[in-house]
Amino acid sequence: MYKSILAAVNEHINSEVSARYAMHLAKSVGGRLHLCHVAEQEASKETIRRAEEAMRRCLRKSKEMGLAVQEIHEYGAPLDRIRRIVRAEGIDIVFAATRQEDVQRRLYAGTMARKLSVNLPCSVALVRVVHMGRIHPKKILVPLKARINHINERAFFAAKMAEAFGSDIFLFHTTEPVTSFFHGEKHFTPLELENRLPKDISLFVEHLDSYGASHEKGFASGKAGRRIVIEAAARRFDLMIMGASERSLLSSLIYENPVEELLRETPCDLIILKAGHEDKQSFGR
Amino acid sequence: MKINSLSVDEVFQALITSEEGLAPEEAARRLAEFGQNEISERRKRPLAFRFFAQLTHFLALLLWVAAGLAFLSDYLHPGEGMLTLGLAIVAVIFINAAFTFIQEYRAEKALAEMKKLLPFYVKVVRGGRQMDIIAKEVVPGDVIIVAEGDKVPADMRLIEVSDIRVNNASLTGESEPVSRITEPFDGEIIGSPNIAFAGTTVSGGSGRGVVFSTGMRTEFGRIAQLTGTVTPGLSPLQKEIIKITRIVTLIAATTGIFFFGIGYFIGRSFWENFLFAIGIILANVPEGLLPTVTLALAMGSQRMAKRKALIKTLTSVETLGSVTVICTDKTGTLTQNRMAVAKTADICEGEGPGATGFSSLDIALLCNNTKEVDGELKGDPTEVALYRAGLESRGPIEQIRIREFPFDPERKRMSTVTLVSGRKWVMSKGAPESMIDVCSRCLSKGTTAPLDGELRKRYISLYHSMMDEGLRVLAFAYREAEEGEIIDAVEKAERDLILTGMIGLQDPPRPEVAGAITKCREAGIRIIMITGDSSRTAVAVARKIGLVRGEPAVVEDADFVRMPDAELRSVLSKEEVIFSRMTPKHKLRVVNILKEEGERVAVTGDGVNDAPALKRADIGIAMGITGTDVAKEAADIILLDDNFATIVNAVEEGRAIFENIQKFITYIFAHLTPEAVPYILFVLFRTPLPITVMQILAIDLGTETIPALALGVEPPEASVMKKPPRPAHRGLIDRAVLFRGYIFLGMIGTVGVLFAYLSVLHGGGWRWGMDLPIDNPLVHKAATATFLGIVMMQVGNVFACRTQTESALRTGLFSNRMILWGIAAELLLSLFIIYHPWGNRIFSSAPVGTDVWLMLVPFVLLLFFAEEARKFYLRRTGRITPGRASS
């Protein structure tokens, strides 16, 4: 799907980098790109000027890439305006950047990123930009948990992002070690983990194959968030793509939330995809 | 596509910046977006959680259960003092938790404070103006100006360079500076020559770069992140404490249940049995163990800090004592890191530069990048030493440098093209084995002679003999450029040179190192030297300091890389091992194999690349002066003076602390038997209640706390560094400790205590088989006699436990004044409990006469001298086991 992609741009550099990811996805899927700037009522002239400069740069870049692009400038509450645009333009996916201050809150509660993720009637890709030097990601890490929702869309997104940049995908699954009172923690070997591969991951792999995305697999035992950070840092991944957390705030407070940990600790750019399309939907295989 | 593959203009576009730099407002915005440019620690658990953990560890849970049972008992049978008991146990749990928590928190804070002392400033262009800012305020897009001696604050893409060379040693372990360019480079960022990485230093030239990643997202941060995410295993002491609590729980619970069952079968009431079970459990649980261990470690770490070793985690103190191998760097740790020219040598007959040439010292001065800044020489230590020697030999020489071909680790040479007295010269210096390839002649009697077979042999032999003296050797050469010669490539410069000779530089060993090495040898600790120097130099230095006596196994970097694990394992099992020409990145492999072989490894390091090895080792030791923040973060111990001898001092302290912990465990165990045996009589033989649960608590948590703590600060015994390290499988508690505590000292104590208890009962008219109610004054008096008996026997015990095998009479009464203060406190508290009405009320005690005190004195003396006899027997028979108490 993703025929219509919206990138939210503002005065912050993160949003511009996030828009670059949107441009490449649009190029990869042949979709139409909507560059959107919503100026809040209290925004200063300087803020608006900077955002407009960013829009101009994004527009120029989009045109250089040969994209069908539409520029949208609006005033008002960003969430309401973007929601209206999504409905009016039939947007399939929105790219928005998370900010440092978002990350400092538990599960970025109350932030614009969270509001967009929860309230927009389409898929949302929240982009955490941390590394400005890896402009075209060549190695993409896709951490997977045992149960995956919207498998097809997530596989499609990963495959198309990889296609856009000519990147390699590395699927990574972690499991908690089994503990016993007498023997302590038992960590499975990668071979044992592969033999115990959850069904959803096998399905994800099938979808990825069907989109022609080459990939490698890796397994590890341990705390998910920490293991993923180690993997991303140790193997110098350029980008990480993972699904949005479906844990409630309460369960995240009680148990650790890997998504939240990764938002804070990620050593490379991170895209958190809140998939909004049903699995039965066709993604243009 | 990455930042290194872009042109300079594209770099500006990608990072949305320009040559003018960022506007200050945009920089502030980016600072808010990307955070501060600093290496942050992993988010720690909130303080409340950490305090909570102190309340919920295994021993604490055990006490919670005891408190819960006491409260339940009070609820079902009010008025029997069980509420007070329950509250007392809860207080104990909180006191223990607070004590341990505060100690750990203080140690952590001390390190955090130290880190704050290290800010540094960088030159940045913002809004077209050059300014100095604190490095942690650097953001992506900033244009940074760096020059020789500067530390690179963040990963940056170079956009302008002037002969810039950076030393990546702290990142890659390569000790030689590498030159940088601005041209695009396809490939990984890490290997890109147009990138300057955070944490590296500029060793020559200058340049500008655009920052593309900061803080934890730099390469430096990546390693820090990896280091931070490696979960360190439990320290041996932590494992021991867990083991002890399990053993103790097992003993306490089994004994409690066993006697509960016996009591039930002989017809005692449920509540009598219940009270007994609680009593037995409390008598067996060493409640004071954790705070005493913590205090011993904390005081040990304070003593170490005074001896220049800063301990980051308390349990490392003890781990140090069990170290079997120390892998140490050479430069700065075994040596003083004060490079100086020690020797100059000419190859041919007839020294001197001749009429038209240069001497080695002249070239050392001219082919050199040392700068004088405010009267100080700045640059690489080797270059500074050469520059200084050149200056002293000949005075300043006017030159105009035309071109430089920086040092390259592949060719191991550096060359310059320079104008001296209006003539153009090529000057070169480098590793002797590489210089010979580009020289065709050598100086001889003021003229030159072909560098033929004989001279080559002489050259190599001279080179080897200088290395055998422990010198770092460099060779020097020059030639005059031909008329109109264009020297625009290194191959054109470095050819047909005239060899002038060699200079040997020496980094003198630290004077105290030889003694420290002897100490290690006596203590059965192997030392493995890991150095970037050549094998011969390393072996010579090792011989000079006594590290090597025979023929050591020497492994060079290239062999190391090729060597399979099995072979390396065999090399590492040898007595004397040296790794030469090594880079820090290989340390981790050495540490891994040593650990797999069951060794307890301490490893030193200062660079970022040392961090994984520091983390992996049982004890990571970072250098306080030359160490990077990442190394310090990864290490368990920071040496404030970078001195090897300090490590050995710390090992000695560590061993002493282990022994001290054993001493107070023995001391604590010794009172458990006299507490438990009267209870057994109470159940089995229906004697009156021999001691109340509150009195047991008064002993465990009151009277004997300070004497136990005092044992934790005993100075090291003279023999502590004469024994081999204790084997890994030997813990704090073994049969020897159990025998000495529970059986030997415990049983002698029990005899004394029972004598006092039964004497008081008998004197009061009690006879076997008589039932006395629990509130009978005679029962209170007899219980008090038991209490006093235990207290008195513990006075004897504390002196007996001061040594493990040496005579306690030789330690000196005043060598540990805390013991005396502890005994004074113990007796004062006992007086309060025995003679003050409040004490009597709280502890169900009653005053006893001086006859009870006097009847206990012979037993105290018996205990002390019996233990002296046991130690004497051990010394005579030589039954002294390494690093521990003996039986």
Image (cartoon, coloured by chain):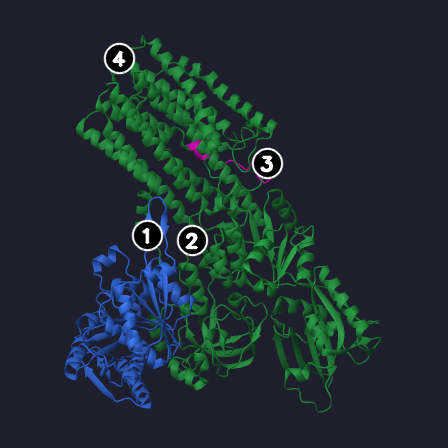
Chain colours: A blue, B green
Residue B524 x, y percent position in the rendering = 60, 44
Q: Amino acid at mark 4?
A: Asp
Q: Which residue is mark 1?
A: A178
Image quarter hosting the N terminus of chain B: bottom left
Q: Nearer the viewer, mark 1 or mark 4?
A: 1
Dot 4: chain letter: B
Looking at the rendering, which quadrant does residue B478 occupy? bottom right
Residue B232, disc: 2
Residue B665 x, y percent position in the rendering = 44, 33
The residue closer to the viewer here, B351 or B281, is B281
Disc 1 to disc 2, C-alpha distance? 19 Å
Q: Amino acid at mark 3?
A: Ala
The residue closer to the viewer here, B832 or B812, is B812
Q: Amino acid at mark 2?
A: Pro
Residue at the limit of the structure toward the bottom, as seen here: B484
Q: Is residue A82 left or right of residue B190?
A: left
Dot 1: chain letter: A
Disc 3 to disc 4, C-alpha distance? 54 Å
- Secondary structure at numbered mark 4: loop
- Secondary structure at numbered mark 2: loop
Span colored in magenta: B706-722
- Secondary structure at numbered mark 1: strand
Dot 3: chain letter: B
Magenta-span inclusion, residue B721: yes
Residue B199 x, y percent position in the rendering = 49, 68
Q: Which residue is mark 4?
A: B771
Q: Nearer the viewer, mark 3 or mark 4?
A: 4
Q: Which residue is mark 3?
A: B718
Q: Amino acid at mark 1?
A: Val
How many numbered callouts? 4
Between discs 4 and 2, the one toward the N terminus: 2
Looking at the picture, do discs 4 and 2 lie on one chain? yes
